[in-house]
Amino acid sequence: MDREYCFWFLLLTTTANTLVKGQGTTRVGFYSTTCPRAEEIVRSNVESHFRSNPTIAPGLLRMNFHDCFVQGCDASVLIDGPNTKKTAPPNLQLGGYEVIDDAKKQLEAVCSGVVSCADILALAACDSVVLTKGPNWNAPTGLKDGRVSSASEASNLPSFRDSVEKQREKFYAFVLNALDPVTLVGGHTLRTSACQFFSYRLYNFSTTGNGADPPIYPAFFNQLRALCPQNGDGSKCVALDTGSDTRFDTSFLNNLKNGRGVLESDQKLWTDASTKCFVRGFSRGSSFNKQFGRSMVKMSLTGVKTSANGEVRKICSKIN
């Protein structure tokens, strides 16, 4: 089984996975004539905020992911109001809204009503990865902003307890092959998680031994217990990529190989035969960076809104 998936890893990374440039009304450089400085203005804002608060980088990447996973990449996660996506439990700890708002204000000053909030968020996510020494990719722009934002639909987001099969099912709603789920979860290299989402793995998880989830490496298990004591502060955050949480790299994937996955859903990518070879392949070479950009582009081109069901918001937090 493992050998079969190794074959698919090689096939998908060398032949079948060409970079998507755009879809329908979207394309790379969409604003080259209507707002030539659009990408520069977004990048400048991200860099400025990053210098004073580096945590905005993982925040913007996560926000983009949470936005795209529900109704497509339409910036509906930015909309204020009761029962909007922003109020859903998985989105309560999202950060980086001020970066998008600042960029939008500057863009409205130079080309009013032209650049969508969805494009600002997509560009900002790419800029964030670059600032943390990760890959750059050509993000297609021309996305429209959605007019609907529903908290209930956030249940489609991947969960920290999801099996690999469940993760794959959720990702397959908008990505195209078996490699993309592992690739996009690899973005956890910059993420943190609150103790409340994984401490159950440390206490009374199993009926034998020390009660830990078996895949956890013993020394790492003790480290996590020290960080998240039983009945302690469940809101305390822990890096998902131990030792390299401020740099976009393959350290997160190597940690999974060594039993150092913090979230149960992440560690399952190594213990499940259908994804193990993908984790191994990415952790050994530079193909992860290239594939991450490809997968982000494919994710951005799912459920693209048009003028019929979208708009370009004047203010990102509310519908026109």
Image: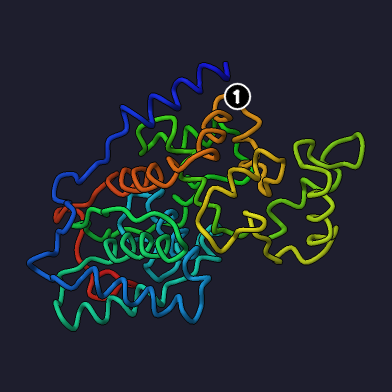
- For label 1, the residue is 273
Where is residue 150 shown, x and y percent of the image? 41, 56
Q: Residue at x 66, y 38 (%)?
A: 257
x 62%, y 34%: residue = 270
Name above or below for residue 179 compared with residue 225: above
Question: What residue is at 24 percent from the left and 72 percent from the top?
Answer: 40
Q: Nearer the viewer, residue 162 or 122?
A: 122
Q: Position of residue 88 (x, y in %)?
A: 51, 59
Depth check, front residue: 77 or 118: 118
**In which quadrant will I find the C terminus?**
bottom left
Q: Amino acid at mark 1?
A: Ala
How many C-alpha atoms fall within 10 Å of the one at disc 1: few (<14), some, or many (≥20)? some
**Residue 201 drawn above or below residue 236:** above
Residue at image location 35% in from the left, 29% down from the top: 14
- Image quarter hosting the N terminus: top right
Q: Residue 180's x, y, as percent? A: 42, 37
Q: Judge whether 25 appears above or below 285 on screen.
A: below
Examine the image and state in which quarter residue 2 appears: top right
